[in-house]
């Protein structure tokens, strides 16, 4: 993972994601945005359907468990 | 010309390095760190910290060329000297909690002006007596928009988890922190919690969820910070987290009813007469020696530390009993005491050299030795309690280099009888004549006073 020029210790990937849940309501909104496609697919919507139905383009690879 | 000494424990952050030169403490800064310093020194929270003493007193040493310390440095700061450097595994619960609150308060204050410490280690807090001081000025950097709090995990490992384990499980954090310089990982903290603890404030999120997420994303190779930024992460999320953490930490309590030692002052067998004679002896000795640093070994309630502090610059009040140190700290902290530092140390197993090359954290003896040592009602615990030979204990005291006020407690004393109750008496070296012979070989005995109870004798001894 990329870390800033000044970061000399590993902030922990999991710990960074957790900060969304700890950030209150505003954090939850960011969390939903980041994990939206996983939440949808959990309820049976695939990424393709989501793309075509909402018309929203995918901005980036979204977090998943697998590590390519 | 005076020699420049490198602080061996300051290597982790490549943007700065601590040096000792001509009796002062300097921090050399890289170009980036120097730029951050120029911002930091103008902030309101830094100036407030300088005034109220919560951030170590710092100035830019423009009169000295930073390159004296190495070609890579472009800036130089001079810090005030901390009277005695101590480590979190020597602090009581309340000390670690106060240090954590200071760290969180500085994060909140910094965020108001868009700065944040790049780490959150408990080693960045030191003490002036019972008042915490944040020392890593070069830790503050500008918070870029959308950046998360990089020090969150470290805060948990070195502040929050030790406090939670002590508060909820009554597990002392000292062996953990002494055994692991990075602190307690979330998975290990979770393993020590019971299912009931998951219902307690903060445990489910900061311990359980963090452990799960760290496992899940352990091998993640993606740009998490970039993803968070794009998804709209912002400063208010850090503020919300830190504010909640602050109230969580402030609410933690460790309240054991009593320990072996905590009731010593009320349970002990001294007569009032003995006690008064002892206090007068100690105060006269402290007044005569006028030490820069006093070690009060086995300080218990700290009553003799306070007497010594009247005539000395700084006192380490040390005890192996956590609850005694905690109670002393709470009193001293409330009184705003700045010259008595309470520390947890077991003299039969004092803090060793630790970390990279064994130089990162230094042993108790290597840090700074005392001008005066108080060893009151201690010798029976060392020789009979901890099986340390009499001659070796006196040899160790001599090696410290200072004067000694030492109390010999005879075998007929009730406290010694208690120690011997369930032990075979193999302590032939525990005799007053042998004690005096050892003492006189290493020291010049200046004063000797037998207490009225006749089982105890006080000595003031100067090193030969």
Image: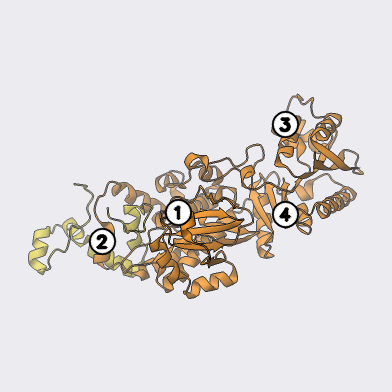
Q: How far apart are marks 2 and 3 (CA)?
A: 60 Å
Q: How far apart are marks 2 and 1 (CA)?
A: 35 Å
Q: Position of residue B399 (x, y in %)?
A: 71, 38
Q: Which of B329 and B445 is in front in this view?
A: B445
Q: Which of A53 and B21 is in front in this view?
A: B21
- From the image, state whether disc 4 or disc 1 is nearer to you: 1
Q: Mark 2 lies on which chain?
A: B
- From the image, state whether disc 2 or disc 3 is nearer to you: 3
Drawn colour of chain A?
yellow
Tag on residue B292?
A: 4
Label 3: which residue?
B392
**Quarter placement of the C terminus of chain B:** top right
Name the element at disc 3: helix
- First along the sequence among labels 3 and 1: 1
Is disc 1 on the same chain as disc 4?
Answer: yes
Drawn colour of chain B?
orange
- Contact (Cβ within 8 Å) of mark 2 with mark 4: no
Q: Mark 1 lies on which chain?
A: B
Label 2: which residue?
B226
Name the element at disc 2: helix
Q: Distance between the residues labelled 4 and 1?
A: 33 Å
- From the image, state whether disc 2 or disc 1 is nearer to you: 1
Q: Position of residue B233 (x, y in %)?
A: 30, 67
- Contact (Cβ within 8 Å) of mark 2 with mark 3: no
Label 1: which residue?
B70
- First along the sequence among labels 4 and 1: 1
- Which residue: 79% across, 56% down? B307
- First along the sequence among labels 4 and 3: 4
Q: Which chain carries label 3?
A: B
Q: Farthest residue in the front direction?
A: B1
């Amino acid at each position: 993972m990329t870390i800033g020029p000044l970061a000399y210790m590993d902030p922990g990937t999991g710990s960074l994601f957790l900060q969304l849940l700890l950030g209150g309501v505003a954090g939850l909104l960011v969390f939903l945005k980041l994990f939206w496609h996983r939440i949808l697919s959990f309820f049976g919507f695939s990424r393709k359907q989501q793309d075509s139905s909402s018309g929203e383009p995918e901005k980036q690879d979204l977090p998943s468990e697998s590590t390519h | 010309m005076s020699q420049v000494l490198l602080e061996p424990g300051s290597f982790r952050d490549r943007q700065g390095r601590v040096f000792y030169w001509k009796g002062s403490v300097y921090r050399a800064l890289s170009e980036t760190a120097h730029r951050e310093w120029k911002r930091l020194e103008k902030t309101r929270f830094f100036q407030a910290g300088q005034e109220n003493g919560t951030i170590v007193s710092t100035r830019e040493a423009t009169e000295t060329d930073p390159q004296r310390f190495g070609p890579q440095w472009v800036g130089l700061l001079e810090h005030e000297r901390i009277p005695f450097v101590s480590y979190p595994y020597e602090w009581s619960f309340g000390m670690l909690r106060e240090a954590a609150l200071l760290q969180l308060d500085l994060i909140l204050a910094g965020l108001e002006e868009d700065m944040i410490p790049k780490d959150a280690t408990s080693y960045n807090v030191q003490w002036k007596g019972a008042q915490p001081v944040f020392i890593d000025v070069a830790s503050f950097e500008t918070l870029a928009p959308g950046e998360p709090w990089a020090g969150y995990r470290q805060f948990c490992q070195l502040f929050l988890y030790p406090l939670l384990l002590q508060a909820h499980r009554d597990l002392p954090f000292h062996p953990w922190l002494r055994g692991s310089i990075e602190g307690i990982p979330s998975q290990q903290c979770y393993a020590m919690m019971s299912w009931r603890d998951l219902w307690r404030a903060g445990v489910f999120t900061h311990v359980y969820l963090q452990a799960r997420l760290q496992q899940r994303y352990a091998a993640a190779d993606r740009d998490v910070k970039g993803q968070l930024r794009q998804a709209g992460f912002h400063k208010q999320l850090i503020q919300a987290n830190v504010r909640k953490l602050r109230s969580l930490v402030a609410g933690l309590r460790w309240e054991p009813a009593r320990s072996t030692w905590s009731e010593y002052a009320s349970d002990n067998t001294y007569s009032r007469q003995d006690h008064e004679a002892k206090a007068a002896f100690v105060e006269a000795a402290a007044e005569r020696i006028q030490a820069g640093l006093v070690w009060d070994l086995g300080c218990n309630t700290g009553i003799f530390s306070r007497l010594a502090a009247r005539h000395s610059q700084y006192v380490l009040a040390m005890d192996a009993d956590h609850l005694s140190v905690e109670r002393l700290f709470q009193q001293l902290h409330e009184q705003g005491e700045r010259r008595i530092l309470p520390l947890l140390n077991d003299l039969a197993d004092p803090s060793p050299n630790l970390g990279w090359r064994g130089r990162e954290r230094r042993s108790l003896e290597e840090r700074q030795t005392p001008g005066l040592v108080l060893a009151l009602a201690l010798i029976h615990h060392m020789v009979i309690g901890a099986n340390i030979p009499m001659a070796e204990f006196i040899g160790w005291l001599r090696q410290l280099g200072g004067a000694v006020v030492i109390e010999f407690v005879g075998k007929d004393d009730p406290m010694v009888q208690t120690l011997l109750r369930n032990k075979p008496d193999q302590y032939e070296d525990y005799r007053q004549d042998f004690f005096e012979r050892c003492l006189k070989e290493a020291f010049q005995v200046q004063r000797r006073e037998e207490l009225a109870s006749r089982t105890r004798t006080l000595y003031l001894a100067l090193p030969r």
